[in-house]
Image (spheres, rainbow, N blue to C red):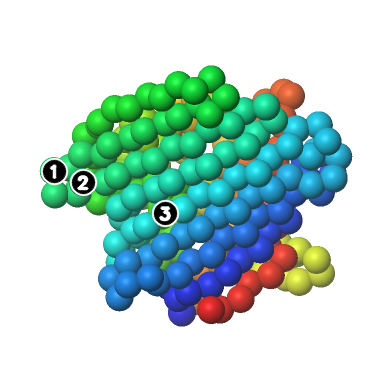
Amino acid sequence: MFPHPEKLGYRIEWRLIVAGNATVQLTRPLPQRWQIDLHLESAGLVSRLYRVLDTYKVVTNEAFCGMSSAFEAQEGKRRFSTAAEFDNARHKLSYNEKDLVKNTAVQHEIDIAPCTYEILGALNALREMRITPGKAVTLPMTNGKKMVNAKVEAQAKENISIDGKSYSTVRYEAFVFNNVIYRRKGRLFIWMTDDAERLPVQIRIQTGFPIGSITLELERDEKL
């Protein structure tokens, strides 16, 4: 039963081609801490057009509320890093963003809720919830630049097939685009197994031209 240390591997598809891969690893560095590590890398044609190599590390408490995060990104010609520290006692978040090409930095502090999630912590918190189709929850979430109460809606039960394997899932929509957390227009859907593991077996981001839809499909899951 989730949560437990694990490693999930995803294939990323864009315009009917394999665009890259993502690995998400959940570990427990201390008894009341979780650490989430994301490694995202483009592949094939996409790497020749727009090379992506991102690493993201999050430390949370037992309930997946944020404590710190660090992001290192190489995306095309861009090189940047961000760091966030959650002061849950003061209900404040300190954010630092550096452009490693232009050699500029931005720092600020924002107010947050007593338990505020970043995006991966929110996904794991959602895995612990049982929301019946037609119901919704709101989660206090941040990207370091602002905090919002983002709506997550359980929409329907669906059976989906990935690489010949069938999954009984619930489809969720997280309303984080359209200037909620992210300014870009789009929609975020998550298909999560309807069992004790609550595996996010498929994630789809739908945006407008020129990107369109990006789909992550689970290729492997491993308990650590």
| Rendered image quadrant of residue 207 | top right
What amino acid is labelled 3 in the image?
Val
Secondary-structure class at tag 1:
loop
Residue indicated by mark 1: 90
- In the rendered structure, the answer to whether residue 19 lies left or right of residue 64 reads right
Along the line of sight, the residue nearer the viewer: 32 or 199: 32
Secondary-structure class at tag 3:
strand
The residue sitting at 46% across, 79% down in the picture is 1
Q: Position of residue 28 (x, y in %)?
A: 40, 72
Q: Position of residue 62 (x, y in %)?
A: 30, 66
Residue 58: mark: 3
What amino acid is labelled 1 in the image?
Arg
Residues at circles 2 and 1 in contact by the CB criterion of under 8 Å:
yes
| Rendered image quadrant of residue 112 | top left
The residue sitting at 65% across, 44% down in the picture is 53
Along the line of sight, the residue nearer the viewer: 202 or 170: 202
Q: Position of residue 205 (x, y in %)?
A: 63, 40
Residue indicated by mark 2: 87
Q: Is residue 150 visible?
A: no
Whichever of callouts 1 and 3 sits on the residue coming sooner in the sequence is: 3
> Is 11 located above or below residue 87 in the figure?
below
> Is 156 located above or below residue 169 in the figure?
above
Q: Residues within 10 Å of mark 3 (few under 14, many from 20)?
A: many
What amino acid is labelled 2 in the image?
Asp
